Image (cartoon, rainbow, N blue to C red):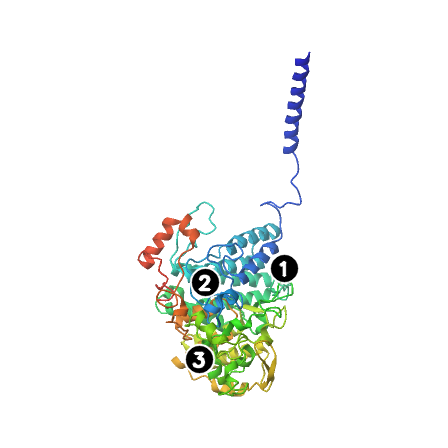
């Protein structure tokens, strides 16, 4: 009888177990948990991708080789806008990079965004379709300009885990076509029919707060950046139509609208919850000086931006120099060729406050005054676009277009970004923000000193130097890329502070670690075909040869 009772109990438990499994299979999905098939708004994915644009390739994903690309960080030291004299507080100056990260997370989120937009709207001829093309193009350019040939045509193909590599030429051909398609889709999204005009609508999920029409301008302005970056290949790659495509955009604003003012900038705005990198609580201004390349350009031209960005060198204000705060020669940039020990010794010189430093410091008054900072961070801006057009005109790509006019437009846009006008009173502070006095912004004298010399080599140098100045603490790696392509401005190298085996600035990055681990055969073939089998930091790629 006891044995029978145990048998009945086991059968009962089995019955409960079986029916329980059947009931679990029939349960509805938890509505509070999203799955791959959930009908999520595309804005959620665009929001993530937009933030990744600001952070830099691989930063959000934590990929090896990733570096934050915003202001006052390592990239800006490599652009030689600032120089650190103490690694613990302000980082290294040395060009100690090796393997690149990737920006493929932009493609992943572009795919999600487009899938959700298609499911909601039944078409990808909407603003998210245009932005998806832009994000893919941006991702490909971000990586190819760092390493050379990259996977492009196979990226996103779920049937292969080892995508083949495309030549850099073919990557750029694909990118230019993508951006053209993105412009066409954006135009359709702005005016989907004769009775609807979405140009003034804000894009949902956009942290930059741009309208449909402004995003179309961003797409075409970015394409101008890409085309000018191909200047070394403009005469030997007829199939890319580099000059012709650049001219088509500039000459046809109805089809290819571009930025018309700083209000169109693709710029990240700081708030107290996501504060500016410097703040009133940051007490380490003594460890960061303005670089000599930047200050040499601004002081030679009597540029009032000098007074806004930098403090005068403390040593220049006392005997035996006794210079005034309005004397441009009192503003002296630090030499990144020196080791940090040499720089720190020169700055402190037995006076911990930096009171006798031979170098100018970052303006505490402008950059440390609030949690939200004095300015947004520009990823792609109007002033850069003006200088890109001026460069193209100088090179003869734009018959009938005045390089001088666009050069002047770029300068005016940069001055406006800083809020500088002729005759304005500018307050000068010391390393801690204490007021030293005021100077008057003489914009007229600056424009006379920096007047465009003509469509020649000297004029091109002026354009590129002013572009460099305008991108101070903005635009990610663009200052470095422009130098690598043109040699202008003449970034400092050759000394131990550069930190490389030959004291020279590297020309590229090594291929991503992930590629070497998971796509070994293809990455090795790419290295062999381009660089003779050595993933060399000092060899030029097709883009820069």
Mark yes or no: residue 471 visible: no
Q: Which of marks 2 and 3 is nearer the N terminus?
A: 2
Residue that label 2 marks: 176
Which residue has dot 1 on it? 204
- Whole-angstrom CA distance, mark 2 to mark 3, is 28 Å
For residue 122, the mark is: none
In the image: residue 422, left or right of residue 483: right
Q: Where is residue 63 in the image (x, y as percent from the top left)?
A: 49, 54
Residue 471 against residue 182 in the figure, above or below: below
Give the image quarter of residue 5.
Answer: top right
**Relative horizontal placement of residue 46, taking residue 489 as reference (left or right):** right
**Closer mark to the observer between disc 2 and disc 3:** 3
In the image, residue 109 lies at what x, y percent?
54, 54
Q: How far apart are marks 1 and 3 (CA)?
A: 40 Å
Count how many numbered circles sit on residues in the image: 3
Pick whichever of labels 2 and 1 is earlier in the sequence. Answer: 2
Helix, strand or loop at mark 2: helix
Tell me the crowding category of disc 2: few under 14, some 14 to 19, or many 20 or more residues within 10 angstroms, Cα based: many
Q: Which residue is pictured at 64% across the width and 40% down the height? A: 29
Disc 3 is placed on an element classified as: helix
Residue closer to the observer: 62 or 261? 62
Quadrant of the frame with the C terminus: bottom left
- The image quadrant that residue 43 belongs to is bottom right
Say the numbered circle drawn on residue 462: 3
């Amino acid at each position: 009888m006891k044995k029978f009772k145990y048998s009945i109990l086991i059968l009962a438990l089995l019955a409960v177990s079986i029916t329980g499994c059947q009931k679990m299979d029939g349960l509805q999905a938890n509505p509070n948990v999203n799955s791959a098939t959930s009908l999520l708004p595309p804005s959620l994915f665009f929001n993530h991708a937009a933030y990744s644009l600001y952070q830099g390739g691989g930063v959000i994903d934590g990929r090896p080789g990733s570096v934050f690309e915003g202001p006052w960080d390592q990239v800006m030291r490599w652009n030689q806008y600032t120089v650190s004299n103490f690694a613990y507080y302000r980082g290294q100056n040395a060009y100690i990079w090796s393997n690149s990260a990737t920006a493929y997370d932009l493609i992943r989120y572009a795919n999600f965004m487009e899938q959700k937009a298609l499911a909601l709207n039944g078409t990808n001829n909407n603003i998210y379709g245009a932005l998806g093309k832009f994000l893919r193009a941006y991702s490909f350019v971000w990586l190819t300009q760092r390493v050379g040939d990259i996977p492009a045509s196979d990226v996103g193909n779920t049937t292969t885990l080892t995508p083949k590599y495309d030549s850099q030429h073919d990557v750029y051909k694909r990118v230019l076509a993508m951006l053209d398609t993105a412009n066409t889709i954006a135009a359709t999204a702005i005016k989907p029919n004769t009775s609807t005009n979405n140009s003034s609508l804000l894009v949902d999920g956009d942290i930059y707060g741009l309208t449909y029409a402004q995003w179309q301008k961003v797409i075409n302005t970015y394409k101008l950046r890409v085309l000018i970056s191909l200047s070394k290949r403009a005469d030997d790659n007829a199939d890319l139509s580099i000059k012709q495509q650049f001219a088509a955009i500039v000459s046809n604003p109805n089809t290819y609208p571009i930025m018309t003012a700083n209000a169109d900038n693709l710029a990240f705005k700081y708030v107290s919850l996501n504060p500016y990198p410097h703040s009133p609580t940051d007490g380490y201004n003594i460890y960061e000086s303005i670089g000599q390349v930047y200050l040499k350009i601004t002081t030679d031209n009597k540029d009032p931006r000098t007074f806004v960005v930098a403090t005068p060198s403390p040593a220049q204000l006392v005997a035996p120099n006794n210079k005034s705060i309005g004397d441009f020669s009192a503003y002296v940039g630090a030499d990144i060729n020196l080791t940090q020990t040499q720089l720190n010794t020169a700055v402190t010189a037995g006076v911990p406050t930096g009171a006798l430093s031979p170098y100018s410091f970052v303006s505490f008054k402008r950059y440390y005054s609030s949690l939200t900072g004095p300015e947004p961070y520009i990823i792609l801006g109007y002033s850069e676009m003006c200088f890109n057009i001026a460069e193209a005109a100088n090179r003869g790509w734009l018959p009938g277009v005045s390089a001088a006019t666009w050069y002047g437009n770029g300068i005016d846009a940069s001055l406006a970004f800083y809020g500088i006008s002729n005759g304005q009173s500018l307050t000068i502070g010391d390393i801690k923000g204490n007021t030293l006095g005021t100077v008057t912004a003489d914009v007229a004298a600056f424009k006379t000193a920096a007047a465009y010399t003509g469509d020649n080599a000297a004029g091109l140098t002026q354009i590129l130097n002013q572009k460099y100045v305008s991108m101070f603490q903005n635009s990610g790696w663009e200052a470095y890329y422009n130098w690598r392509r043109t040699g202008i401005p003449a970034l400092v190298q050759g000394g131990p502070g550069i930190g490389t085996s030959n004291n020279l600035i590297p020309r590229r990055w090594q291929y991503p670690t992930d590629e070497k681990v998971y796509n070994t055969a293809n990455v090795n073939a790419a290295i062999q075909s381009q660089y003779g089998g050595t993933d060399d930091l000092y060899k030029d790629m097709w883009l820069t040869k």
